[in-house]
Image (tube, rainbow, N blue to C red):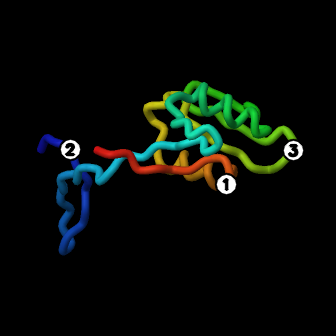
Amino acid sequence: MSGSGVWVFRNGVMQLQAEQPAASRRALVYVPANETMASLEALERRLGALGWERYYEDRAVVQLHRRDGGLDLISLPRDFARFRSTHMYDVVLKNRDHFKVVDLPN
């Protein structure tokens, strides 16, 4: 069977269900400047100004921690094309007054 989708169980049978088109795309916005984060470099620059610095990096992931010794970590994909809502909400949760997630028009 070819195509894309999600495997689901229905009545005890596994079936390939076609993926639904995304209702909307999301973007991470730096609130003070109303700037949409379009790259890892732009996001790191804004986070750096808020006290975050690189803690660990490898070929796939960049981790940031607070310079002040806090225990929080933010993990981001090095390839910004893999930046998803879960990453966005992690940034927002740890920087509540500085970032927000918005829905973009289709």
Q: Left or right: where does residue 104 sit relative to residue 45?
A: left
Q: Position of residue 77 (x, y in %)?
A: 54, 34
| Residue found at the very far front of the displayed protein | 33
Q: Residue at x 64, y 55 (%)?
A: 93
Numbered tag placed on residue 68 in the rendering:
none
- Quarter of the image for the N terminus: give it: top left
| Residue found at the very far bottom of the displayed protein | 11
- Which residue is more in the foreground, 58 or 74? 74
In this figure, which residue is indicated by the disc labeled 2?
4
In this figure, which residue is indicated by the disc labeled 3?
69
Which of disc 1 and disc 2 is earlier in sequence?
2
- Quarter of the image for the C terminus: give it: top left
Circle 3 — which element?
loop
Q: Between label 3 and label 2, give the one nearer the viewer.
A: 3
Q: CA distance from mark 3 to mark 2?
A: 44 Å
Q: CA distance from mark 1 to mark 3?
A: 19 Å
Q: Residue at x 65, y 42 (%)?
A: 32
Question: Mark 1 near mark 3, Cβ–Cβ under 8 Å?
Answer: no
Circle 2 — which element?
loop
- Which residue is more in the foreground, 27 or 10? 27
